[in-house]
Image (cartoon, rainbow, N blue to C red):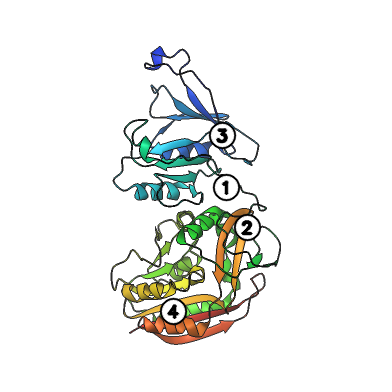
Amino acid sequence: MTTRDRTVGRGGPDDMPLPLHHIVVDAHDLPALARFRAEVPGRRILSEREREVVIGPDETAPVGMCFMPGTDRKAVENRLHLDLTTRAADREAEIERILVLGARTVDVGRSGDESWTVLADPEWNEFCVVRPKETLIAQSLERAPRGRVPVVRPDPRLRSPCRRGPGPSRPRRGGAGRWQWTVVDTLRMDSTSIRNSYDAVADEYAQGLTADLASKPLDRAMLTAFAEQVPKGGPVADVGCGPAQVACFLDDLGVPVLGLDVSPGMVAAARRRRPGLDVRVGSMLDLPLADGELAGIAAFYSLIHLQPDERPRAYAEFARVLRPGGLVLVAFHAGEEVRHRDSWFDRPVSLDFFALRPEDVAAGLADAGLALAATLMRGPYPGEADTERAYLLARRL
């Protein structure tokens, strides 16, 4: 990112010896990046040529952004980034809107007291959304010095700053999207780390799971049995839906279904995969649903990221939103091991994967008022991580 820099005077643009004209951004995909950068602050595409796209509020605006072709891959932090502010009553809702447009969250080890949120555009250029401001220096005394904006590099060698616990490394299959695990001893991963990691790999993950269920007959069998037994007249939620492969399968069976995922990037991928499908950003620890709203819940490999003390809360949420007689079908890696990923699809991530004991999950569901109805265990299919898989079907009492 570069600027056509001008010396700024005290008055308006006419008083400046060299007024600022354009902020110039090198881009790999000019139209896509320009559309994103226009939609985020509510600007327009003013001019679109083969090697130049200009955005701004209108044709008479003194300053705009110009996007030009760039071939170099981003490898270092930007020396310049933009701060955006909002007058929206709910800044978090505005940030969620930007994430759905294609932004990625950048984990910088925030304490939670900062007045800004660091995001990256689809080509990994950082920018910040700061708390509402009316002037350039308003609230400046309330803001701590930010220093450098750390970069999230799409480099598989980069270790995530969110990593918890050292642990010995145990490599598995190679390749960008293959499982390469690190077994760790002590962890504490939060929902932000989960969201950031899945945002980072959403596009590649979705492409790799286009026909995921086609090669898994037992998964299809359990989902089909679930669909046949779920009470009629109510929707089913695919919780932790990712790119919605399970939701699409249920939809094809004629089941009214909606998807929920903590990652806005995954939600966007799901919406692209099945336009018109109801897919929302939401956490299983606080489901954005009314009591008794659902006839069923499918949660495939989403419990595996929860800390042990979070699982009872998730089970209680399942029970809360299910009507009496409603079904929940959960799938997870069986066992007691915890594994960690630092890199996935050549992107830095920080994800912990908990293998769970089926009897513990069944007991947790029962404590929440969900009685076990069926259990299936299977080994890994070709290309899967070498873990045993468990499927539990439970009914709301």
Q: CA distance from mark 1 to mark 4?
A: 40 Å
Q: Residue at x 44, y 60 (%)?
A: 262
Label 3 to label 4: alpha-carbon separation = 53 Å
Looking at numbered disc 1 in the image, what kind of residue is underneath it?
Answer: Val
Q: Amino acid at mark 2?
A: Ser
Q: Where does label 2 land, which residue?
A: 343
Residue 362 screen position, x and y as percent: 45, 84
Q: CA distance from mark 4 to mark 2?
A: 34 Å
Q: Earlier in the sequence, mark 3 or mark 4?
A: 3
Helix or strand or loop: what does disc 4 sit on? helix
Query: How far, Cα to Cα, is label 1 from label 2?
Result: 12 Å
On the question of residue 88 being in view, the answer is yes
Mark sitting on residue 226? 4
Camera-side residue of 283 and 131: 131
Name the quarter where the N terminus is drawn: top right
Q: Nearer the viewer, residue 84 or 319?
A: 84
Q: Amino acid at mark 3?
A: Arg
Are there few (<14), some (14-19), or many (20+) residues within 10 Å of tag 3?
few
Horizontally, residue 388 falls left or right of residue 299, namely: right
Label 1 SS: loop
Q: What residue is shown with label 3?
A: 79
Which callout, 2 or 3, points at the residue further toward the start of the chain? 3
Q: Secondary structure at mark 3?
A: loop
Q: Residues within 10 Å of mark 2 (few under 14, many from 20)?
A: many
Q: Which residue is mark 1?
A: 152
* Residue located at (45% from left, 30% from top): 55
Mark 3 and mark 2 in contact (Cβ < 8 Å)?
no
**Callout 4: few (<14), some (14-19), or many (20+) C-alpha neighbours within 10 Å?**
many
Look at the numbered disc 2 and give the secondary structure of its residue.
strand
